[in-house]
Image (tube, rainbow, N blue to C red):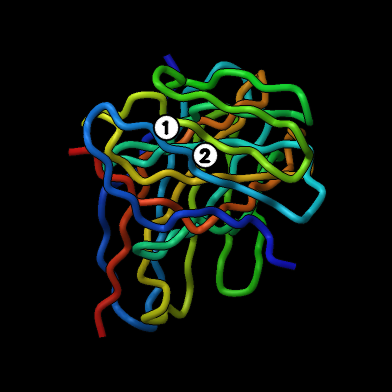
C-alpha cells in the first residue's frame, strides 16, 4: 500500500498565481484533512472531509478551496497565492473521526510564495 | 481558548532517558496523541492515551493525567535516530485535534 500520496514535494509560486496540491490515499479512509505547518506553531487545520461529497472548514480556511469527489482524492486549491501562504502543507487521513483514530500523513509540500 | 504547551527544545545523551512534557487546556477531551516528526518528514503516530495512566510500547511510554491536563512521553535507551520533533495533540469535545508546537529533541553521543 502506498498510504497517503501527496504531490508536489516542492513548489514556488508568484503572488497571485493559483495551484492545486494533490492528495490521494489507498486505505479507504473516510476522513481526510489538510494542515499547514509553520515554524514555532502547531499544525493548523485548513479544511477537512468526513466522506465523499462532504467538506468543512478548519481553523485557517481563507484562501484555500477543497473538494472531495471520491473517497480517495482530496485536492487543495490555492486561489490567489499570497506570501502568507508560504508554509509546509500536509495531507492526512484516518479511518474515522473517533477519539482513537490516528492520522496517516502524506510526505508534505514545501510551498514558497514570492 | 484552547492551548497545548510543550518545551521548545530538549537535549539528551545517547543511551539515557528523557521525558517530554505536555500540558493542555481544551474544550473537552477525547484522547491525547503523540507523534514523531523527523526533520523534513511527515509526522508519524507514536501513542494514544484516553484513560489515566501509563501506556508502554517498547522503548517509548506515554502517561496521562486528565485531572491535571498533563501528559508526558518517556523515551528510554535513547538512540541517535530518536533525534526528532515530538508533537502532542489533543482531541477536543468536537473530535478536532489541537496541536502543540512540538518539542525538538537533540540526542548527543
Task: Rate crowding at label 2 as few (under 14), some (14 to 19) or many (20 or more) other CA atoms within 10 Å.
Answer: many
First in sequence, mark 1 or 2: give its number: 1
Categorize mark 1 by other alpha carbons within 10 Å: few (<14), some (14-19), many (20+).
many
Which residue is disc 2 drawn over? B89
A54 and B89: which is toward the camera = A54
Relative to A46, say whether B15 is above or below: below
Q: At x 66% / y 50%, what residue is drawn?
A: A24
Q: CB of mark 1 within 8 Å of CB of mark 2?
A: yes
Badge number at residue B4: 1
Q: Chain of mark 2?
A: B
Coordinates of residue B84 in the picture (x, y in percent): 37, 65
Instruction: Give the residue at x 57% y 27%.
Output: A66
Give the quarter of the image for residue A112: top left
- Give coordinates of residue B44: x percent, y percent: 55, 58
In percent of width and height, residue A86 lies at 27, 38
Front residue (pair B96, B64): B96
Amino acid at each position: 500500500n502506498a498510504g497517503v500520496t501527496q504531490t508536489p514535494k516542492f513548489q514556488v509560486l508568484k503572488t497571485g498565481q493559483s495551484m492545486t496540491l494533490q492528495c490521494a490515499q489507498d486505505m479507504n479512509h473516510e476522513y481526510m484533512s489538510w494542515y499547514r505547518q509553520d515554524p514555532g506553531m502547531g499544525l493548523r487545520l485548513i479544511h477537512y472531509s468526513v466522506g465523499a461529497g462532504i467538506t468543512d472548514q478548519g481553523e485557517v480556511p481563507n484562501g484555500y478551496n477543497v473538494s472531495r469527489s471520491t473517497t480517495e482524492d482530496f485536492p487543495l486549491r490555492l486561489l490567489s497565492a499570497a506570501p502568507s501562504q508560504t508554509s509546509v502543507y500536509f495531507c492526512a487521513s484516518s479511518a474515522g473521526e473517533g477519539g482513537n483514530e490516528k492520522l496517516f500523513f502524506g510526505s508534505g509540500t514545501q510551498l514558497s510564495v514570492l | 481558548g484552547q492551548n497545548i504547551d510543550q518545551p521548545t527544545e530538549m537535549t539528551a545523551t545517547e543511551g539515557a532517558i528523557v521525558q517530554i512534557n505536555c500540558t493542555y487546556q481544551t474544550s473537552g477531551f477525547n484522547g491525547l496523541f503523540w507523534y514523531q516528526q523527523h526533520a523534513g518528514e511527515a509526522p508519524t503516530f507514536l501513542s494514544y492515551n484516553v484513560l489515566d495512566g501509563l501506556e508502554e510500547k517498547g522503548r517509548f511510554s506515554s502517561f496521562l493525567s486528565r485531572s491535571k491536563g498533563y501528559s508526558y512521553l518517556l523515551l528510554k535507551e535513547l538512540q541517535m535516530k530518536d533525534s526528532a520533533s515530538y508533537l502532542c495533540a489533543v482531541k477536543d469535545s468536537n473530535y478536532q485535534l489541537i496541536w502543540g508546537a512540538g518539542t525538538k529533541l537533540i540526542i548527543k553521543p
